[in-house]
Structures are given as C-alpha cells and as structure tokens.
Image: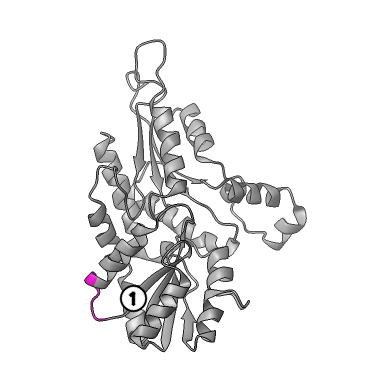
C-alpha cells in the first residue's frame, strides 16, 4: 500500500465507554488534546464495551431519549467497536493506524483489544506484502502492564505523579485521599496495590488509599486502614477514566450501598470528586506519551 503513495496515518482512542452524557466532555477533551498533539492525523473514538455501544445504539433509536439530550455528538451516538473502527479507516485508505488504549491498566478490556490488534497484524495476503496495513500499533494503558515492552514501574510512577492535583486538594482539606477503582473478581488487583505504594512514595506525608469495587483491596479493608490511621475526614475520588455510572451511583450515590454512605455510617466526613481521571491534564498527557511511544516502537513517523 505504501509503495504507490505516502502512508496515511490515523489514531484511534479506545475507551471502555460510558452511558452518562455528563461524562462525555472529558472524553471529547482528550480527543481534542490529541488532535492538537498530532495535527493532520485524524483521531477516532471507539468503545471497547459491547454494553456501552449497545446503550448508544438503543438511545439513537429512541426519539424520546434523544429529545432529552439534543446536543449529543453524532460520533458518540454512532460509536463503533475497535474492529469496525479499524476496518472503516483501512477501507478509507488509512494503512498506518495507532490504537491507543484509554484503559487504566492491562486488564480484561485491554487484553481483548490487544487480541484484536494482534490478529489483524497477523493477516498475510496471497501476494507478497505486509497485508492490509503498513503499520498497526497498540499504545499501552495508563499503568502499563507486563510484557508490553516498557518498564511497568516507570508507567506507574508517572501515573502517580499525574494525580498530584488530587493529593494537593486532599491535603488542603486535611482529608485522607481515597480512590475507588473498578477491580475484577477473577483477576488479581496487584496493580492497584503497586499504584498505592507509588503514590505514597511520590507524595509522602499524606494518607492515600485505594480500594476496588470487585476484588481487593475492598472497601472494608480501606475502612479498617482509615480507622487505624485515626482519619476522620475523607476525600473520595474515582480511580476510573470517566465519571459515569460507577462514580455517580456506586461511589457518590445517596443509596445505602454506596461508598460515600458506607463511609458516613462509619463516622467519616466525606467529600466526593465527581470527575474521572480523564479530567486531569497530567493524566491525559500519559496517553499522548504512550501514542508517541507506540509510534516509535513500530516505526510510525
């Protein structure tokens, strides 16, 4: 493909997705940032979650729901999965594509995305040549991961520095900083513990904890540690990319099962940050750097 004309490059930003319109501005701001960082290279969004894509497909077909949110971007209403997004670009003549993960770490969603990219890379045509793509690169998630040709600890440390604004805000409010991550009941959550160790080392002298909704460290473990610290005030923040349903319902909801209400029943004063990590400029910079690393590693100029 690249022999007859200059390579045509594109970047795909692959997020898990969200069903909350209020969470979309932070995602779209990431896309705008990447457009400035990589001028003249088209940027596309994709949602890796089948459930999130189905939600927007159903909303697109429901006039009543659309009327309640008249300003929803067309690209969200018509959001596609990674495979379809890559195929659309390739069919339009883009033969060098960087797929940048917007996931927190190399969990199930990232591994599925990686499988798609590797499968497409393996395609070989009958005639000699590189196949459908001159280059198809995958950018690692924010916290990196094992086997991704990059120092995982370096990624974790950089992510820990990226949340400095949260640490400063908690310190100013004389509150312990507690992050709520997603976790996975079937996948070990050591990455969260590694992040907690890094953020405490890089921001010493202030109580910082992280717990997850599924797996460990659990909310009960976080509460036990807060009690042992003698903490009486907490700033509760999401360790999630976007402030969607988990943030507004599971973390900061007013129902008895939310983290906020459980902490209050434990006698803690709780303030909640209703924004995802995507809202932090320093966190967005992680994805920008990972795109550049993926381009360099795969010879994409």
Q: On the image, which quarter does residue 168 sit in?
A: bottom left
Per the image, label 1 sits on a secondary structure element best described as: strand
| 43 vs 165, nearest the viewer | 165
Please determine whether, in this image, residue 19 is positioned above or below residue 201.
above
| 283 vs 108, nearest the viewer | 108
Residue 175 image position (x, y, % from top left): 38, 85
| 264 vs 185, nearest the viewer | 185
Check the picture and name the quadrant holding the N terminus. Answer: top left
Q: On the image, which quarter does residue 69 sit in?
A: bottom right
Is 204 colored magenta in this rendering?
yes
- Is residue 94 visible in the rendered image? The answer is no
For the image, the number of numbered tags is 1
Q: Which residues are magenta?
A: 201-205
- Is residue 201 visible in the rendered image? The answer is yes
Q: Which residue is label 1 attached to? A: 208
Residue 195 image position (x, y, % from top left): 31, 63
The figure's colour scheme reads one colour
Residue drawn at (35%, 12%) of the image:
128
Query: Badge 1: how crowded within 10 Å, few (<14), some, or many (20+)?
Result: many
């Amino acid at each position: 493909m690249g022999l007859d004309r200059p390579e045509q490059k594109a970047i795909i930003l692959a997020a898990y997705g969200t069903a909350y319109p209020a969470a979309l501005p932070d995602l779209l701001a990431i896309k705008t940032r990447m457009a400035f960082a990589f001028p003249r290279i088209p940027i596309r969004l994709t949602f890796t979650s089948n459930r999130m894509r189905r939600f927007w497909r159903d909303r697109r077909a429901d006039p009543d729901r659309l009327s309640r949110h008249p300003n929803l971007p067309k690209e969200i209403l018509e959001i596609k999965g990674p495979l379809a997004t890559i195929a659309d670009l390739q069919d339009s003549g883009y033969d060098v594509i960087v797929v940048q993960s917007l996931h927190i770490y190399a969990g199930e969603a990232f591994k599925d995305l990686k499988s798609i990219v590797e499968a497409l890379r393996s395609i070989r045509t009958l005639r000699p040549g590189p196949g459908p793509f001159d280059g198809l690169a995958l950018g690692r998630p924010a916290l990196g991961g094992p086997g991704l040709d990059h120092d995982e600890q370096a990624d974790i440390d950089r992510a820990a520095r990226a949340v400095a604004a949260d640490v400063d805000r908690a310190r100013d409010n004389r509150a312990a900083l507690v992050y709520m991550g997603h976790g996975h009941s079937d996948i070990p959550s050591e990455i969260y513990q590694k992040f907690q160790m890094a953020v405490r080392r890089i921001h010493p002298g202030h109580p910082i904890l992280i717990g997850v909704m599924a797996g460990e460290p659990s909310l009960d473990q976080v509460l036990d540690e807060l009690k042992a610290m003698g903490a009486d005030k907490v700033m509760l923040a999401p360790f999630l990319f976007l402030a969607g349903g988990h943030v507004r319902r599971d973390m900061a909801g007013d129902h008895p099962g939310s983290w906020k209400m459980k902490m209050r029943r434990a006698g803690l004063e709780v303030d909640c940050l209703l924004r995802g990590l995507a809202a932090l400029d320093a966190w967005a910079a992680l994805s920008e750097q990972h795109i550049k690393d993926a381009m360099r590693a795969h010879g994409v100029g």
